[in-house]
Image: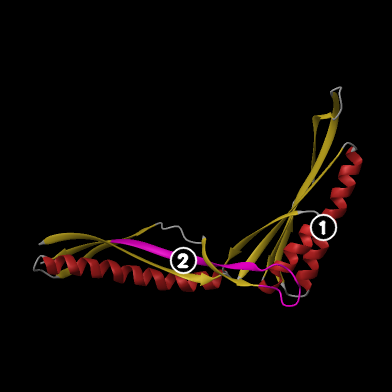
Amino acid sequence: MTTIHATGTSETHVLAERATITALVSVTSRDRSGSIDAATRLHNWLVQRAEQLRGSCDATWHSADAISTYSYKSYAEGKLKQVVFEHRTSSRVRVKLSNLSLVSALVTELSEAGVTTNVDWSLTENTRRVYERRIRKAAVEAAREVADDYAEALGQRVERVVSISDTPAGGGAPVAAFARSAAGSGAPEVTVAEITVSATVTGVYEAV
């Protein structure tokens, strides 16, 4: 009897269904109250915009972090180095879009309002579970095929599966994409990512 160890991997790429846009507010001023007031107005506008998107069912979720302010020293321009204090107020608002055709226009809108943005792509939990089940089964089949090949090379056949163990294989990173733009918005094209869903298993087999 021969013990065979074989590994099988399966992966698929699924078009993202959600886009989480993070808007970062940062307002710097020598006047502390002015910094806080300007950042607060921008922060509240972002929250209202996110609520509008949820109300129109274009977004499924949003969150708003607390505003924070810190002070630091800087030097005024000129021949004499004059120390001044500046105050920076910042916050973060996130909104998860389900209508991906709005991503480009919204990013442009937020950028023009004076915030820094970034986009994270994801699948819904239901979709991820469906594909995870498929690729787990495919990974088990791939491992068994490798074991059968080794057994055949030895002039044997697999008689029993001793164990199957799952190996963390990452997944979720955007790896491929295609372009989609907001119709008629004049906004630059945005890339909608494909999400990798993968699984790797190691099997132990007995062959005779």
Left or right: where 69 falls relative to 159? right
The numbered mark at residue 70 is: none
Q: Is residue 126 above or below residue 90?
A: below
Q: How many marks?
A: 2
Q: Quadrant of the N terminus?
A: bottom left
Q: Secondary structure at mark 1?
A: helix
Q: How is the image coloured?
A: secondary structure
Q: Secondary structure at mark 2?
A: strand
Residue closer to the observer: 152 or 111: 111
Query: Disc 2 marks which residue?
Result: 197
Q: x, y percentage for residue 20?
A: 66, 62
Q: Nearer the viewer, mark 2 or mark 1?
A: 1
The numbered mark at residue 113 is: 1
Residue range in magenta is 181-202
Q: x, y percentage for residue 48?
A: 83, 63
At x 88% / y 49%, what residue is drawn?
38
**Location of residue 104 (image quadrant):** bottom right
Other-residue count near label 2 (Cα within 10 Å), few / some / many at <14 / 14–19 / ≥20: many
* Label 2 to label 1: alpha-carbon separation: 36 Å
**Location of residue 64 (image quadrant):** bottom right
At x 30% / y 69%, what residue is drawn?
142
Q: Is residue 35 above or below residue 99?
A: above
Left or right: where 166 falls relative to 118? left
Other-residue count near label 1 (Cα within 10 Å), few / some / many at <14 / 14–19 / ≥20: few
Q: Amino acid at mark 2?
A: Val
Q: Is residue 148 above or below residue 111?
A: below
